Amino acid sequence: MASPNVLLVEGHDDLHVIKNLLKRESIDLPIEIIDCGGIDPMLERIPVQLKASGLKILGIVLDADESVSARFDAIRNILTKSGMSSFPKAPEPNGTIVRESDLTVGVWVMPDNVERGKLEDFVALLIEPSDDLKPMVNTALDEIYRTGVPRYKTSDRSKAFIHTWLAWQESPGRPMGLAITMKYLTASPSVQVSFTNWVGAVFKNP
């Protein structure tokens, strides 16, 4: 039987980061987290998921990438075509939640529903502000740019940052989700509190 409470995410990193973050915060809810394998498969899956028998709650977490509004509009258009008439035109800063009849839909646009970016920008905020490796990583990345031969896109700077930072830990190169479990990522910034509060609000019993 399909789960009545589903959270769609773009990839396996999102799945494990969210799963381990909720565990760290002792948030235990009956949620099936589904790795969609990318933004395009996610957008294709949403209308199918909405038609699933017994669905009561659908959460959606996706990256803003270059535009929060463009990503949110893509989700809004799908939901509107599927019959959800009251979905807002812009995301709520603390996460969007809409309840219509017997269906709840929540949307979180990484990193914070306001700024462009992605999961890695969100995860970087879980590094303690006083961490002494952060400026060293940024210096190294800046130096690579000064050489004129960076091997990653400017839009992927946050990915380069977090994975370089993880490569310099006691157990180098651990995935982001595991880094939470291993307590490398221990900060609880306001955006993380907002995110976990959003998850709790979306998936609580209406």
Image (spheres, rainbow, N blue to C red):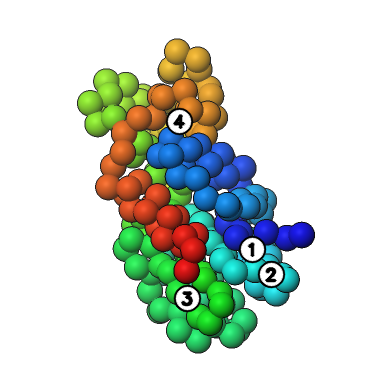
Residue with the mark numbered 3 = 99
The answer to whether residue 99 is left or right of residue 13 is left
Crowd band around label 2 with a 10 angstrom C-alpha radius: few (<14), some (14–19), many (20+): few
Indicate the secondary structure of the residue bearing disc 1: loop
Q: Is residue 177 above or below residue 155?
A: above
Residue with the mark numbered 2 = 54
Name the quadrant containing residue 185.
top left
Q: Is residue 180 at all visible to an observer of this figure?
A: yes
Name the quadrant containing residue 199.
bottom left
Q: Earlier in the sequence, mark 3 or mark 2?
A: 2
Residue with the mark numbered 1 = 4
Q: Earlier in the sequence, mark 2 or mark 1?
A: 1
Separation of residues labelled 1 and 4 (CA atoms) = 28 Å
Crowd band around label 1 with a 10 angstrom C-alpha radius: few (<14), some (14–19), many (20+): some
Going 62% across and 42% down the picture, which residue do you hit? 12
Q: Is residue 45 above or below residue 81?
A: above
Residue 176, position as x, y percentages in the image: 50, 33
The residue at the far front in this view is: 205
Could you say which is closer to the camera, residue 145 or residue 14? 14
Separation of residues labelled 3 and 2 (CA atoms) = 16 Å
Q: In the rendered structure, which amino acid carries the disc numbered 4?
A: Ile
Q: In the rendered structure, which amino acid carries the disc numbered 1?
A: Pro
